[in-house]
Image: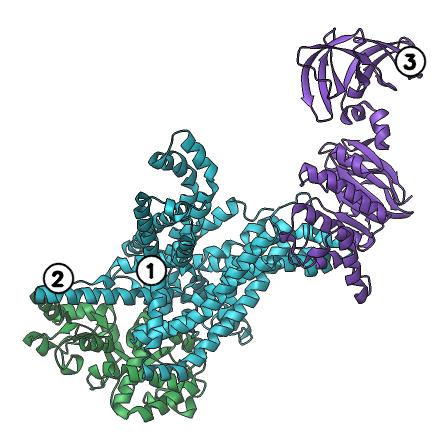
Chain colours: A purple, B green, C cyan
Amino acid sequence: MWLELDNVVRRFGQRSAVDGLSLQLAKGSIGCLLGPSGCGKTTALRAIAGFEPIDAGEIRAHGRVLSRPGFTAAPEHRRIGMVFQDYALFPHLTVLENVAFGLHRLPQQARRPRALEMLSIVGLSEYVARHPHQLSGGQQQRVALARALAPEPELVLLDEPFSSLDVELRERLSAEVRAVLKSLNATALLVTHDQQEAFAVADLVGVMKEGKLEQWDTSYELYHRPSTRFVADFIGQGVFVRGEVIEPGTFRTDVGVVRANGTHWDAGEEVDLLLRPDDVVHDDASELRAEVCQRAFRGADFLYTLKMPNGTQLLSLVPSHHNHAIGEHIGVRIEPDHVIAFKRR
Amino acid sequence: MTVDAGELWHAAERGLLQPVDSAVLAANIPEAYRDPANRWFGFSIRARTLVYSTERVKPEELSTYEALAEPQWKGRLCLRTSKKVYNQSLVAMLIAQHGEELTEKVVRGWVENLATDVFANDTQLMEAIAAGQCDVGIVNTYYFGRLLRDKPEIPVKLFWADQEGSGVHVNVSGAGITAHAPHREAAQKFLEWLSQTESQSMFADRNLEYPANPGVKADSIVLEWGEFTPNPINLSKAGELQAAAVRLMDRAGYR
Amino acid sequence: MATPASNRYASERSPRILAGGLALALCIPALAPLIVIGFAAVSPDAEIWSHLARFVLPEVASNTLMLVISVAVIGGMLGTSLAWLTAMCEFPGRRFFEWALLLPLAVPAYVLAFVAVGFLDYSGPLQTALRGTFGSSVWVPPIRSLGGAAMVLSLATYPYVYLLARSAFLTQGRRALEAAQALGYSRSQASWKVALPMARPWIFAGIALTAMETLADFGAVYIFNTRTFTTAIYGAWFGMRSVTTALQLAGVLMVFVLIVFVIERRSRASAAFASARDMTRGSPRFELSSTGRVAAACFAGLIFAIGFALPIVQLAIWAIERIGDLDSRYFGFVSRSLLLAGSAAFMIVSCSVLLAYIQRRLPSRFSQAVIRLATLGYAIPGAVLAVGVIVPIIFLSNALQDLLRTWFGAGAPTIMFQGTLLAVLLGYLARFLAVGFNPVESGLQRITKSVDEAAISLGVTGAALLRRVHMPLLKTSLATAATLVFVDVMKEMPITLIVRPFGWDTLAVRVFEMTAEGEWERAALPAVAIVLVGLVPVAMLTRRGAHVA
């Protein structure tokens, strides 16, 4: 394993910012810590970088202990690169000098070519002589990335790298950043509060809440097989409905009978079922009819908020050529591929 | 009204003062202490003379201002800055007596004998003598009087310079009437009043100076310092030669 | 928002011209000295000039140069190192020293100077005590020397560097260090390679300010009897009575000032380029080794002691000795100081408001240039301003007098502007307009155009707009401006000394006169009053959290 966190705890006074965090990242993979602000993801990142000590547990990079209670290897000895949220470019140096800044371990003549190479990878070869204040936000971010990657660190950390950019730029840069990291076979860990970023860039995503890691998995699994209620709620959209198991695979709910795979529930158990918008399918042939309360046009589809006969509101994702007005009744079918259900509290 | 004859001379030269024809003033104020053209009158006199440490110097060793330039005083002399008008007038008087060349030699000699950097004021100078930083200096008598009032035990005494020769350098606090004064008669009356006994005593005693009116006795403290012969050259010379004095001091390195 | 000239209606032109004229008028006090110096430069009095050039200029120029360079170096190092310690590191007493190290700003250089000389000179209490105990005090270096002057001026001016360097380190320092560490540099390597260079524009701007203060200083160098340009100008004016000499010396001084001024402007401009976002929340301070912590605390404590605490104690002792001086004469000084400072504050704040509105309503290169000109008086030394203001006034006054004589003959009324408060106030206007203008300008800028437009769309325009929207929002800026000008005028000495009308002695002038006579104790009481007043802006600075991370 390239990076291992083993029950890491970091406290500030009485509060634990990071509370028993464990994860593993293999070489060449890109991980992400995702969660609302205050969940401890940035603290975890800074602890990995060596800017925060830890109070319990261990942080290891391919076997070597980086941090443990009472010992924090200095950041400059960790060979861990970091892209800061505000980029932290050195304003008094040119772009080229910024990128070359970390290359002091290379022989003199190798530095400039390497820096130029990195800049061409991020597509900024024409800007080598500019100063940071002369670049746009997206360009500065790419310089920061090039600077962090130039010394070929063993791990790259990215702290909310896209938070200060506009939405369009974000999508484009997410893809670019992933491409760059993959092309260099870099191992990276990113923190963000934005799900789209997490899904676009990372191979493995960990959802954090109040210092704890709720689930560490691929984006697909997080979406379709959330292991905790929080993850289910946090990732994607959906509505919880109450249900009772009639028999394994069949649930009676307030909005009708739902059939889905889910063999580990026994008859009679009371559960909360998560119904995502893609589980509520528009079917004119269905007997079950719901009223359109709200509609949000999203280009390729509509996100309808539907009021079911018993009053429960569900979300439904419908291709947008099905243009229904508010107040109309449309037929729906509830068809989850697999069920996301949790024991009723 | 101002201190220093030089200032008065300049005011007169610039046409700021008008001549006053007054028998009272002519009688009360000796010629040496008023403008030959009667544009200004001195009302109190201050002497600028030598002071010495009673612990390290015997009065027999002292004689004139010029003598302080001699090698025996090397490292023992303290002077006030040349920027102050009192020293400028002193040097101006020396120029009037000896001419520029000789005076420049004297001033250079003083500079060589300095124990330390020039002082900003006479009081500091006398404190330095008392503390032992130097042994002899040149001050105005009223500073000595003030210091004596605060510290009566101070081991410093006055010495009347050049008593065998030209006499102690004196200067005046004086006044004149401005050229465009609106109340000329009242001003003249005021000046005449100033020259009379009662006001002379008040004027001089408060500042521990000597009254210009020779008929008026000085304060008892002042009298204790003894009598002296003042230098009889008319003080307007001080004003005339002030610019030359300043340049001379610059040349000689007297800061 | 440029309207083509053809679209401007005639009705808009006259207020524009009026405003432009007023703005230009405000430039005159600051420009007059420069113009007068220019004239004097082309008509030198050959005899005096050659005397000056041979005997006076070399010493004066070398003294001034050495003084400025030493103060720049010492003050720069003091300010930067203290800023580093309080902004980036943790050590015992750090929180106290953060604001306490600013306190020397309250003490004018000339006060610090006379306390130093009075205390440390041969006949002062320290050496006298040493001689009493040990028999000799020769190892105490002479205070009345160039070195002494440099030390005192450095202590008086390092807060400028401290303040600016601190601000740089606080907003950028820690983040820059982390970025460098993530690129393989150790903390100390990162400090030298990154944090310090990034703070360079601020540090240089601060050093330029200390250099300007040193070039302008008159009181302190006079006490040290160090011959610099300012004392030479004063000597030429009062001693040699040569106006042209004084002006020529002022001209040479202005060359030095110009160089420093350009450095200051350039540094400020490049400081604007550096990133301004403060993302250092949560970045912890350096932990120093235990010897490091002790050393840091001792260093900060030492500077605080010799720069502020000990001088204040000595001042207090002397003042108490002379408490009997608190008589009606003393209160006369106080009231005159207050009166002058108050009228100056009122006048300058009004002019500042005028200028700020001209800038707002008529933004153009012309108005920008005019404002730059009007406010550059802060760089001109007080002695130069004094001479430069009074000469045109005398000239005008005489010209007017002659004119009146030709009309009315001998019975013409007498005009004498030079003896009036007008001259003093104009001198203050030239020197302190920048001080009043800056807070007013930033206050007005905070009232964005959108606020104006919102008010107008709701029907509130013209005088009502000013009254209901601008004035309430400007209240604090106006108060700040008035306070800063008030305090600066209270402390001001050279202009007041040279230009004041007969009998208008202020506290500052009193301090000067007492120190010129060597009466340190008697100078202490007025000095204490000045320092107390000087504490007000320092308190304002610290309250506004300029020092807080």
Q: Is residue B183 visible?
A: no
Looking at the image, residue C464 lies above or below residue B142: above
For label 3, the SS is: loop
**Residue on which disc 2 sits:** C413
For label 2, the SS is: loop
Q: Is residue A149 visible?
A: yes
**Where in the figure is residue A92, as x and y percent of width and height?**
64, 58
Mark 1 crowdedness (10 Å alpha carbons): few <14, some 14-19, many ≥20: many
Mark 3 crowdedness (10 Å alpha carbons): few <14, some 14-19, many ≥20: some
Q: Quadrant of residue A325?
A: top right
The N terminus of chain C sits in image quarter: top left
State whether discs 2 and 1 lie on one chain.
yes
**Residue on which disc 3 sits:** A249
Residue at point 70%, 26% (across, down): A298
Q: Nearer the viewer, mark 1 or mark 3?
A: 3
Subunit that carries the residue with mark 2: C
Subunit that carries the residue with mark 3: A
Marks 2 and 1 in Cβ contact (< 8 Å): no
**Residue on which disc 1 sits:** C29
Residue at point 28%, 66% (across, down): C392
Q: Nearer the viewer, residue C305 or C124?
A: C305
| In this rendering, position of residue B232 left or right of residue B251 | left
**Where in the figure is residue A193, as x and y percent of width and height?**
73, 34
For label 1, the SS is: helix
Amino acid under disc 1 = Pro
Mark 2 crowdedness (10 Å alpha carbons): few <14, some 14-19, many ≥20: few
Q: Nearer the viewer, mark 2 or mark 1?
A: 1
